[in-house]
Amino acid sequence: MKGISGKEMEIVSELEFKNQYFFTREEIKRHFTSANEMNVYLHRMRKKGRIIKLNKHTYYLIPVRAIGGKWSEHPYAIIDEIMDGKGYCIAGKAAAYYWKHMEQIPFQYEVFNTRMQKKMEIFHAKINFIKKRKENLPKITEREIRGHRFLIATKGESRKWS
């Protein structure tokens, strides 16, 4: 991993001190004189492997304590941050595994949502976003894991995927 500049270290230190690993551009803009300067620094930090861009506004800071730049966050928390906490449902075998309808650990996380259809791989978790109409989304419930909330198909809905 490449070294980081003084300004990058200032941002990383502040976020680590607050234990805030998910952050937005708005939360760090006070460190910069312009939006262009912020874009340059965010690009450099992404290139160095210090941050990961999750969506248009949200980034994930790789903690300094990560050994060799390797770190992992729970996929449910990552999915919630990518989707901005709304308009989605973790479904499929990931939901069945969460509710203990099956014992096999899922190798892919299916996310039903109303906005996008694409596949991503973040922290070696394969996430498959499947676009559906709002009325076709399964019934959902809000749960929490490691202090982060997420939306998942209800226990009854997830039985069909086991």
Image (cartoon, grey):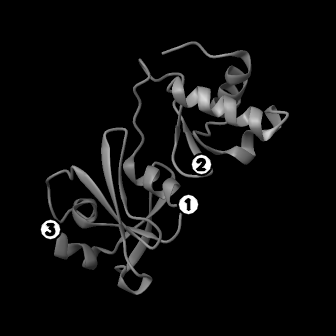
Query: Which residue is the site of mark 3?
Result: 162
Query: Which residue is the site of mark 1?
Result: 84
Residue beneath the point at 40% across and 76% down: 140
Residue beneath the point at 76% across and 32% down: 37
Residue 101 has which mark?
none
Instruction: Give the residue type that dot 1 points to.
Output: Asp
Q: Secondary structure at mark 3?
A: loop
**Tag 1 and tag 2, C-beta contact below 8 Å:** yes
Q: Residues within 10 Å of mark 1 (few under 14, many from 20)?
A: some
Instruction: Give the residue type that dot 3 points to.
Output: Ser
113 relative to 58 in the view: left or right: left
Task: Give the spatial CA distance, label 1 vs label 3.
Answer: 28 Å
| Outermost residue, right side | 33
Residue mark closest to the camera, 1 vs 3: 1
Query: Which residue is the site of mark 2?
Result: 58
Residue mark closest to the camera, 3 vs 2: 2
Q: Residues within 10 Å of mark 2 (few under 14, many from 20)?
A: some
User: The C terminus lies in which quarter of the figure?
Assistant: bottom left
| Outermost residue, top side | 3
**Tag 3 and tag 2, C-beta contact below 8 Å:** no
